[in-house]
Image (tube, rainbow, N blue to C red):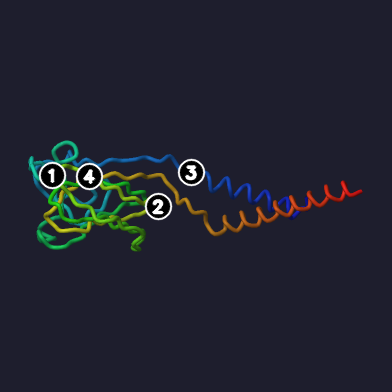
């Protein structure tokens, strides 16, 4: 093994270890909104999220709009989004997270999640029709996001038990990590070929 090959192989080993090491312990959070009582606006900074006046809450039993748990659910703020109009109220996280999904109930019209990272749309779910049974809509996206929008008709749905996971890092290695891995794997392949040639030469002799 040459000095260059040894260094490259060591670099690849370190790169693989870094890529496989989690940034921290992952924590999944479920927001059930049950500490919000009565009818009102979801306040800015509630549970650390930016709501921008897009959502209201209620804790009144409504057969067509049942909650997934407890008494409280949230919905598009009617003062900002006229009922019956197509809208996309959203909320933002203070850090990049994995958004898992939430429960919806309401009228059987289509709605979906739109997920963003730093202002760029990264994923959109298929259309989901709510019903009078609270049903989970998964995001279907394992990457990181920091903004989520609910695209649909204002006044046709309520949302409950919103779930997200923090403490995750991107599964895609950084460019420098890829470079070290490629160089290291190339060196490893070269060492294997050299070893085979040496064995072949010994057997031929």
Q: Nearer the viewer, residue 120 or 191?
A: 191
The secondary structure type at the circle numbered 4 is strand
Q: Nearer the viewer, mark 3 or mark 2?
A: 2
Q: Nearer the viewer, mark 2 or mark 1?
A: 1
Q: Which of 186 and 15 is in front in this view?
A: 186
Q: Disc 1 designates what residue? A: 132
Q: In this view, does 15 lie to the left or right of 22?
A: right
Q: Which of marks 3 and 4 is in front?
A: 4
- Which percent across, then down, holds residue 31? 25, 42
Q: Which of marks 4 and 2 is nearer the N terminus?
A: 4
Q: Disc 3 designates what residue? A: 22
Q: How crowded is mark 2: few (under 14 residues within 10 Å), some or many (20 or more)?
A: some
> CA separation, marks 1 and 3?
40 Å
Q: Nearer the viewer, mark 1 or mark 3?
A: 1
> CA separation, marks 3 and 4?
29 Å
Q: Which of marks 3 and 4 is nearer the N terminus?
A: 3
> CA separation, marks 3 and 2?
14 Å
Q: How crowded is mark 3: few (under 14 residues within 10 Å), some or many (20 or more)?
A: some
Q: In this view, does 39 lie to the left or right of 120?
A: left
Q: Disc 2 designates what residue? A: 143
Furthest toward the top, the residue is: 70
> CA separation, marks 2 and 1?
31 Å
The secondary structure type at the circle numbered 3 is loop
Q: Earlier in the sequence, mark 1 or mark 3?
A: 3
- Which percent across, then down, holds residue 86? 16, 62
Q: Disc 4 designates what residue? A: 103
Q: How crowded is mark 4: few (under 14 residues within 10 Å), some or many (20 or more)?
A: many
């Amino acid at each position: 093994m040459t000095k260059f090959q040894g260094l490259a192989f060591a670099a690849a080993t370190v790169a693989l270890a870094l890529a496989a090491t989690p940034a921290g312990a992952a924590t999944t959070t479920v927001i059930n909104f049950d500490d919000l009582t009565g009818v009102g606006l979801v306040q800015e900074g509630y549970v650390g999220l930016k709501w921008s006046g897009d959502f209201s809450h209620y804790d009144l039993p409504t057969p067509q709009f049942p909650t997934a748990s407890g008494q409280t659910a949230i919905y598009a703020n009617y003062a900002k989004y006229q009922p019956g109009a197509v809208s996309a109220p959203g909320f933002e996280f203070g850090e990049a997270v994995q958004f898992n999904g939430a429960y919806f109930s309401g009228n059987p019209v289509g709605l979906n999640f739109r997920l963003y990272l730093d202002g760029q749309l990264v994923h959109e779910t298929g259309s989901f029709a709510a019903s009078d049974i609270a049903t989970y809509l998964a995001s279907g996206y394992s990457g990181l996001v920091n903004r989520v929008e609910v695209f649909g008709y204002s006044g046709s749905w309520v949302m409950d038990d919103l779930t997200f996971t923090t403490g995750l890092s991107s599964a895609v290695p950084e460019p420098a990590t890829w470079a070290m891995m490629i160089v290291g794997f190339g060196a490893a392949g070269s060492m294997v070929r050299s070893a085979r040639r040496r064995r072949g030469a010994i057997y031929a002799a």
